[in-house]
Image (cartoon, rainbow, N blue to C red):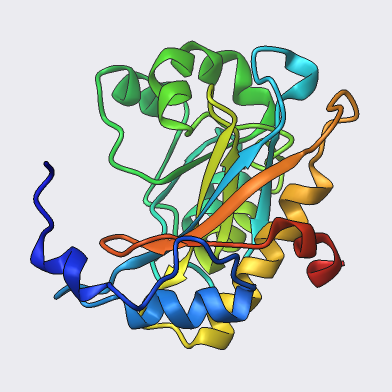
Amino acid sequence: MAKITKRTKAFEGKVDPDKLYNVEEASEGAKACATAKFDETVELAFLLGVDPRHADQMVRGSVSLPHGTGKTARVVVFCKQADQVAAAEAAGAEAVGAEDLVQKVQGGWTDFDSAVAAPDMMALVGRLGKVLGPRGLMPSPKAGTVTPNVGQAVEEIKKGKIEFRVDKNANIHVPVGKASFTAEQLQENAKEIMRAILKAKPSACKGTYLKSCAMSTTMGPGFRLDVTSIAALVG
């Protein structure tokens, strides 16, 4: 028989595993369960009714959170034109380069959270697919990270723009913010994420698109959301 930990016992009565919560209840509940000694991340987990093995059912995109993620993203930019280099550096990119930066990443350096590339760099950046792809860091036009306006892209990411992508099991995990956020801030961020994922529904998806959704903190329990009300809630 599995041992019930002291932390698990502390959550008893704070979450009902049989209840479907609305966003407001889940946000407040997640905050109440954030008892770790660090500022826990609040996350939404979605299970979608798609088959990611088919390209026409891939779900991927980006969304700007009104209150950010609570973390300043480290961004690298692949570009070579002088004006783009200057814009990326002015926007606060941690590293800017062309062939030299590609070689550095090929060597195993991935100490960053997001990558932006100018369109004319994608022939080179494409070589990094095996390094960046599995980490979800590969620049993509759909996510807005392949663009000639690299400075603007860096600014948006720094302010809280995040990417989402369905995994091989049809799940999407997205950070909503930090436990130190107010419940209202978490709610507003969550609604923006839900809007983006609902809008990203592939036309090839038949049947139920959003199967389940839950909100939780790093060390806390999950609050299952009432998915039937999400479309109306964010509509």
The residue shown at (87%, 67%) is: 235
Q: Which residue is nearer to you in this view: 132 or 26?
A: 26
Q: Which residue is nearer to you in this view: 114 or 181?
A: 181
> How many labels, in total?
0
Q: Is 159 placed left or right of 142 in the picture?
A: left
Relative image position of residue 126 (x, y in whole percent) = 55, 15
Q: Is 6 placed left or right of 57 in the picture?
A: left
Using the image, determine if residue 215 lies above or below residue 13. above
Relative image position of residue 195 (x, y in whole percent) = 77, 59
- Residue 149 visible, this angle: yes
The residue shown at (9%, 50%) is: 3
On the image, which quarter does residue 100 sit in? Answer: top left
Residue at the extreme front: 1
The residue shown at (77%, 38%) is: 209
- Residue 87 visible, this angle: no
Q: Which residue is nearer to you in this view: 123 or 186?
A: 186
Relative image position of residue 148 (x, y in whole percent) = 71, 41
Q: In which quarter of the image is the N terminus?
A: top left
Q: Is 91 placed left or right of 222 in the picture?
A: right
On the image, which quarter does residue 205 sit in? Answer: top right
On the image, which quarter does residue 107 sit in? Answer: top left
Using the image, determine if residue 58 lies above or below residue 9. above
The residue shown at (25%, 61%) is: 219
Q: Which residue is nearer to you in this view: 182 or 233?
A: 233
Using the image, determine if residue 127 lies above or below residue 101. above
